[in-house]
Image (cartoon, rainbow, N blue to C red):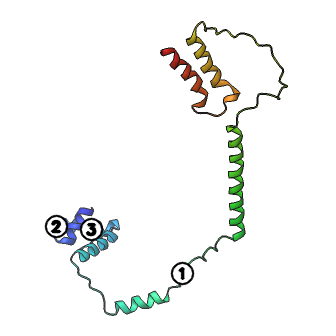
Amino acid sequence: MGVEISQLVDGELDQLHVDRVCTRLAEGGALDAWVTYHLIGDTLRQQADLSPGFHARFSERLAAEPTVLAPPLRRAQRPAFVAWAVAASIAAVGVVGWFGVRELQSPQLGPSAQLQSVDKVQAVAAKPANLVQINDYLLVHQAHSPATALQGVRPYIRTVSESGREAR
């Protein structure tokens, strides 16, 4: 139906179809589409046929409309709120830093003991039975040890250096 209305507005429809489309327009209530197609055609052809005094009537109606007020501007945040936010941020950084410093310190293994004198004994170097099994054991132990709460490379340094000696 839209194509036929467009052809009727443009004058491209034959007389047989014109009667049928006009009947359907009257019965179907497609007059809004008819007006819209005429408006589109007038706009494309730049035919702005305004009635005399259109501008004056439009200006009067526009002036008669109520003024829409913008919502009030939100007041800037109170300085006290900003000060509390800054203080809370500084406190949070301090707490996180304190826990971080505690983690970086070496773990305490127990209370300090009194040093006692020991008799000098000749030390004999013992060769481990199977170095590969010991290294595997050390890796697993270091991964689960509470003394290695700090993640990173540090727990593996000794094991890697020992396996480097074995490869030589």
Q: Residue flagged by tag 3: what amino acid is it?
A: Thr
x and y percentages locating residue 145 in the rendered image:
68, 25
For label 2, the SS is loop
| Number of numbered markers | 3
Give whichever of discs 1 and 2 has the lower sequence position: 2
Determine crowd level at label 2: few under 14, some 14-19, many 20+ residues with C-alpha closer than 10 A. Answer: some
Q: Image point 27% across, 68% down: which residue?
A: 23
The tag on residue 23 is 3
- Depth check, mark 2 against mark 3: the one in front is 2
Q: Nearer the viewer, residue 134 or 87?
A: 134
- Depth check, mark 1 against mark 2: the one in front is 1
Seen in the picture, residue 91 relative to 18 is either above or below; the reply is: above
- Depth check, mark 1 against mark 3: the one in front is 1
The tag on residue 68 is 1
Where residue 42 sits, quadrant-wise, is bottom left
Q: Nearer the viewer, residue 105 or 140?
A: 105
Q: Residue flagged by tag 2: what amino acid is it?
A: Leu
Q: Answer left or right for 134 relative to 59.
A: right
Name the residue carrying label 2: 13
